[in-house]
Image (tube, rainbow, N blue to C red):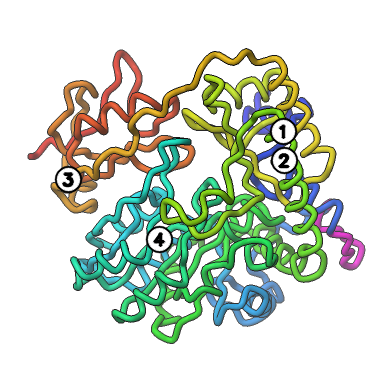
Amino acid sequence: MRIPILEALEDYVQQGIVPMHMPGHKQGRGFIKACGKELKGFSFAQDMAKMDATEVPGLDNLHYPEGPIKEAEELAARAFGADYTFFIVNGSTAGVYAMILSVLNPGDTAIVMRNSHRSVYNGLILGGIRPCYVMPYFCREYGIAMGITSRDIAHAMDMYPEAKAVVITSPNYYGFCLDIKSIADEVHKRGKLLLVDEAHGAHLHFSKRLPDDAIAQGADMAVQSAHKTLCAFTQTAYLHVKSDRVNIERVREALRVVQSTSPSYMLMASLDYARALMEEKGKDMLEVAIDLAVEIRQRLKDVGIVCPGDEMIGRYGIAGFDTTKLIISMSHWGYSGYHIEKVLREQYKVQLEMSDPYNGLAMITMADDNSTVGALQKALMDMAQKFPKRGHLPVENVDIPLPPMALAPREAYYSPKAEVPLDQAEGMICGDFIVPYPPGIPVLCPGEMITKEAIECIGRYERVQGIKKEDALSIPVVSSF
């Protein structure tokens, strides 16, 4: 009998791969080495299947919490410095949807960073929101879309005074953070709301050595993926609110729309656990992770491997950097991020979080230790000795101009579509998201004109969602215009 998913997972674990990727508990290390809490003979790390329950008396209801779930969310709000915190079991994606649906109405306008995650654009479609995009600055040295400044946001708000909210992302996938406080000041000065996709920043609140979190800097709402950087299961997140201008009951209603009516108690319990761990032991564990990240960065620098970080502060709209995100660049030796990831996995049994045309990315969390980070360091230092230097890999022009918006995303989503060859699509209206994944930032969104620059950019990525690759590359376009 075949059980393909279970068999694939079993094979991955049995290979002994060192996971430098999410979830942050790193194959349970974050539970096993730190949990230690026995509940009437049960261990959360060992007896999860027995705890896979449903809304029976005593276990509360996520959508109408009155008991332990209510208490757990209140404890989380206190721990993260929020007025309200809501547990999310459908990923940060659902939290982003709820943020947008709870403060904006169909037909409203929002100012949105154009390098947002796909979930933000989906939220705009669900809510019938018209976006006004702000393009980020682009670092040509490493081929990374970076940040924006409060001045950029202020200019956008002055250009589109009808906008009711601003949606930004910080940190980005690579760990670069915006000056949220300055942005929040400009947003609130104009009576608007600031919503932050902070999926990669759930740990920031717990160390002074890391940038301040969004809520601490004045954001009205922020969504954090607990599974990315804390010790919680995949698909878990927190939605924090700290604002007297957000209708809390409408937030609850939005969450009832976008979340399952049968939420997993294992996921909710891991959210509760992740919060408790951070309050009890997590801060010290996080300090160890930061020390490990600082040390490996210096060791790699000594052998000529570049790990961009703090030196970007003050440039490209960047105000802070999360040092637990280890960017690995060997493009100056002629090697792509894809190549680094492939060699690490196939020759050293180390799996990165992601790669792009120029960089690899490793995530160091508080579940890591000298053995895991040491394995990554040893592998990279060995690669530095063996790789011949073959010239600089030029960073091609992927900071393309913002494609013109011919239709609102929702209008394009519901329009008839057709597939056309990618090389013949210039001038047509894109009918779907065209997304290099990871990091999940669209090159084209529904409703945008397909430009020559966008077509060229798509061709530079190995993994692109939305493009069909059967006989030839094809792209969905709106066929009724």
The structure residue drawn at horizontal position 63% and vertical position 34%, both measured from the top left corner, is: 352
Q: Secondary structure at mark 4?
A: strand
The structure residue drawn at horizontal position 65% and vertical position 15%, both measured from the top left corner, is: 387
Residue type indicated by callout 4:
Ile
The structure residue drawn at horizontal position 41% and vertical position 35%, both measured from the top left corner, is: 436
Which quadrant would residue 151 be assigned to in this image? bottom left
Which of the pair 467/354 is nearer the observer? 354
Residue type indicated by callout 3:
Pro
Would residue 160 be counted in the magenta stretch? no
Q: CA distance from mark 2 to mark 3?
A: 43 Å
Residue type indicated by callout 1:
Asp
Is 2 displayed left or right of 26 in the figure?
left
- Which one is closest to the eye, mark 1 or mark 4? 1
Instruction: Check the picture and name the quadrant holding the N terminus.
Output: top right
Verify CB contact (< 8 Å) between mark 2 and mark 4: no
Instruction: Kindly identify which residue carries mark 2.
Output: 298
Instruction: Kindly identify which residue carries mark 4.
Output: 168
Instruction: Kindly identify which residue carries mark 3.
Output: 404
Which region of the structure is painted magenta? 35-46
Vertical placement of residue 260 versus 82, above or below: above
